[in-house]
Amino acid sequence: MAELLDNEDGGVHGAVNELDTVLSRGGLFDIDFSKEDVREGWKERKICEEHRKELSTNWNSSHYYHYYRRRSSPARSGQNRLCSIPKSIEEHNPRPNLKTKLEINKDEAFAMLKKEGLLLHIGLRK
């Protein structure tokens, strides 16, 4: 995971690097990557390429179902992304189309995990 650790461009929504992004999406929010011993401990670990794609490099791909989607219309082939926040947090019927890009950041996701015991991936649209 040394490559993910060194990829600071892969840190999104409050994550400091790509490894932090991947681990946060798996529920590990409180790792201090500023400590050298922590960084060294993660460098030798491995991640399969499919999980890296799903949790980082291909996050927005329609191959993975991180977002709810609705066909834009029967005549069009595109899809609109919808709010992906679980109904247990916010009831909304039908799920609204998202015209603006509001995504859950690392701090919000960690707070929801601590408060509700519910893991929301950073980057989910709200």
Image (spheres, rainbow, N blue to C red):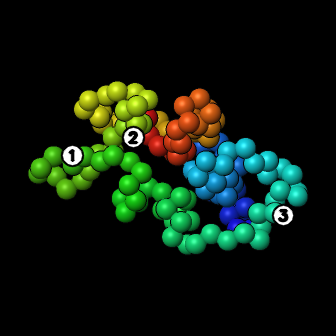
The residue to which callout 1 is attached is 72
- Which of label 2 and label 1 is nearer to you? 2
Badge 1 or badge 3: first in the primary sequence: 3
| Residue kind at label 2, given as amino acid type | Ser
Q: Is residue 51 left or right of residue 35?
A: left
Q: Position of residue 44 (x, y in %)?
A: 77, 71
Badge 2 or badge 1: first in the primary sequence: 1
Determine whether label 1 and label 3 are within 8 Å by CB.
no
Q: Is residue 63 above or below residue 112?
A: below
Q: Secondary structure at mark 1?
A: loop
Question: How many C-alpha atoms fall within 10 Å of the one at disc 3: few (<14), some, or many (≥20)?
Answer: few
Q: CA distance from mark 3 to mark 2?
A: 35 Å
Q: Is residue 115 above or below residue 16?
A: above
The residue to which callout 2 is attached is 84
Q: Secondary structure at mark 2?
A: loop
How many numbered marks are there?
A: 3
Q: Position of residue 10 (x, y in %)?
A: 63, 57
Q: Is residue 84 left or right of residue 45?
A: left
Question: Which numbered disc covers residue 40?
Answer: 3
Badge 3 or badge 2: first in the primary sequence: 3
Question: How many C-alpha atoms fall within 10 Å of the one at disc 1: few (<14), some, or many (≥20)?
Answer: few
- Which of label 1 and label 3 is nearer to you? 3
Q: As drawn, which residue projects farthest toward the left?
A: 75
Determine whether label 3 and label 2 are within 8 Å by CB.
no
| Residue kind at label 3, given as amino acid type | Glu
Residue at 79 percent of width and 47 percent of height: 32
Q: Is residue 41 above or below residue 126?
A: below
